[in-house]
Image: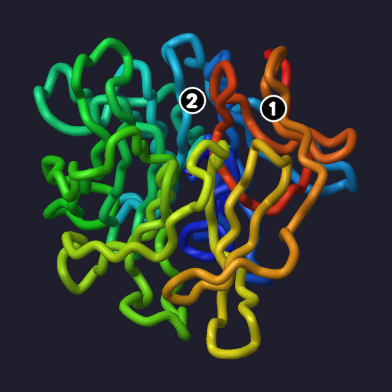
Amino acid sequence: MRCATLMRPAFVLTALAAATGALGQASNAGVNLNVMAVNSSNGKIYSVTFTPPGGSTTVGNTDGSNYQLPVALAFVTNATTYQLDLLVADQQRGALYRYPGALTPQTPPNPTTATLLWNSRSAGSGPLAPNALAVDGDGNLFVTSLAAANGEVGSPPQLWQFPVGTAGSGSFAAPVLLDGSFGPGENLVEVALAPADVAGVSAVAGGDLVVLTTTRVLAYSRSSGFTSRTTLFTFPNPRINRSSLDFWPIGNGAGANYSLLITNLTSGTIERYYFTNPLISAPAPFYRGLVCCSTGCGCCTRPATPWRSWRGPGRYSSSARRPAVPVPCSPP
């Protein structure tokens, strides 16, 4: 996730929303919505508020200069502290970081500097170029890694799992490679978890892992330990730049109770697919009118309203989450 929101246990924005990744994860009605976003150009992590109308952002961390290319966020419940922690993936460093308490203001204050969770280069294993994060209800962390990134000659795209550790949610065991077999030119883009109440899609159940690649949409079954893979959809034109995906709790009214939203940066739309097997393209996009810059800050906007964080030249801090309030586009 590029964002973090908390509505349901995993709704990422290119920021991150938490009630449940640079946006976020979200929470159910009646629960405070916690949305966070990361600016990949300067490492600043923002808390996003929705009131008063128009919203606002507040920088929460003081260690932005520590990052090289932070591109993804995720929330995880900490079974020891009973708080949410915020996880950050730095694609350039090949590292994962943690903010205990997720930068939430309180007394005594939560840390505004991150602690290192994992560095794949020093550890000698794990995702070398992490670019998307997702955490399931058990506390397992899933990470995608880009191919041949950052000078790592021949490194393939890979899907990794950090199993929940012995101390429970918020602790992690050593990473396990789930999948490193992808097609020529195929790269991994985003990852999400199927909602617990998903229905109407054969071979997919709640808690299964859904992965967006540059060429298709894959599902990994939880019952197999996330090792059994099903192709849900193959894109007719793999050259289209798709950047993120997430679930929308409205299906086609004929079995499927969810849709899958995928951001199309080439057309400036959020594509909608009914979550069936195979996916069925909806008659119309979920949203039209995203303006995706190729120069400058490189953010996607609604008319006059930036809502996606910058991931670097031509890339975007993930997510097909609901456009909401402005997220700073140019490095402040």
Residue 13, horizontal then vertical, whole percent? 59, 46
For image coordinates 21% across by 61% down, the residue present is 226
Q: Is residue 220 left or right of residue 133?
A: left
Q: Amino acid at mark 1?
A: Cys
The image shows residue 275, relative to residue 231, as above or below, that is below
> Does the rendering let one see residue 104?
no
Mark with earlier residue (1, 2): 2
| Residue occupied by mark 1 | 299
Q: CA distance from mark 1 to mark 2?
A: 25 Å
Closer-to-camera residue (249/107): 249
Closer-to-camera residue (133/282): 282
| Residue occupied by mark 2 | 112
Task: Give the farthest residue toward the bottom.
Answer: 254
The image shows residue 272, relative to residue 148, as above or below, that is below
Q: Is residue 143 left or right of residue 291?
A: left
> Does the rendering let one see residue 156?
yes
For image coordinates 58% across by 52% down, the residue present is 262
Q: Is residue 115 left or right of residue 26?
A: left
Residue 38, horizontal then vertical, whole percent? 56, 29
Helix, strand or loop at mark 1 = loop
Q: Quadrant of the C terminus?
A: top right
Residue 74, horizontal then vertical, whole percent? 44, 44
Q: Amino acid at mark 2?
A: Thr
